[in-house]
Amino acid sequence: MPRKRRPNQQEMELWNRIAQSADPLGRRNLEGGEQAPAKDTINGTQTAVPAPKPDLPGFRLGDRAVKKDKDHDLVAPLSERLATQPLNMDRKAFTRLRRGKLEPEARIDLHGMTQARAHPALTRFILSSQSHGRRLVLVITGKGRPGDTHGPMPVPHGVLRHQVPRWLSMAPLNHAVLQVSQAHVKHGGEGALYVYLRKPR
């Protein structure tokens, strides 16, 4: 293994000149600016003066975070879903329907029933109404009581109120139903639905 050679006097002088011309890291702040050298009052050597701290406005963690609504239900409200469905019936008749100008020919009150009782009762009522040639019927679901919103999963407000439109859009009822709309306030408002039926074949 070769022995390490000590630098000669000329090499040491060259190294000292390079070391004196180098800029110590302590003289640069984080933003890349120079720190002014200052005389040490005790021994007269040069030391780096710390850069002044920038004057930043006060803030709190999360101040600029986007605030979300307390409601964590990802499903749009029932009234919005019914309003955005395609129009399948005559527009003039639908306008009169929404204004409560058309009188339902029959009605069923599901309010207070369990889903197990309400679903078959609704199915019998709709199919029977269509076979009798009725066009407009009223389905009363009730508004329901507020569910427990403290759990990890959202609970819909009024189970039947949300389930009935789903049942009406599924077989066998979807073949009998032409249009579903929220009832006018005189016929129950948010607690009832207009169901406009197809003509029996």
Image: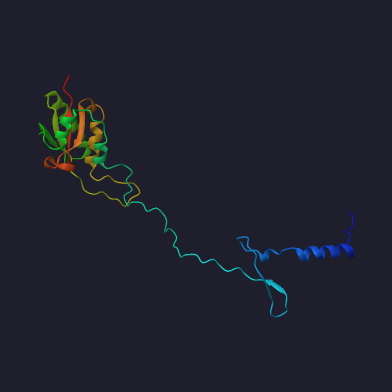
Quadrant containing the N terminus in the rendered view: bottom right
Apparent side of residue 179 relative to residue 101 in the rendered image (left or right): right
Position of residue 136 relative to residue 26, above or below, is: above
Residue sitting at x 89%, y 63%: 10
Residue 112 in sight in this render: no
Residue sitting at x 81%, y 65%: 17
Position of residue 16 relative to residue 168, above or below, is: below
Position of residue 105 relative to residue 24, above or below, is: above
Quadrant containing the C terminus in the rendered view: top left
What x and y, as percent, mark residue 40? 69, 77
What x and y, as percent, mark residue 69? 33, 51
What x and y, as percent, mark residue 125? 15, 30
What x and y, as percent, mark residue 13? 85, 65
Question: Quick one: 158 or 94, which is closer to the camera?
Answer: 94
Q: Quadrant of residue 183?
A: top left
Count of labels in the image: 0
Apparent side of residue 139 relative to residue 2 in the rendered image (left or right): left
Residue 131 in sight in this render: yes
Q: How is the image coloured?
A: rainbow
Q: Quadrant of residue 117?
A: top left
Apparent side of residue 185 relative to residue 82 in the rendered image (left or right): left
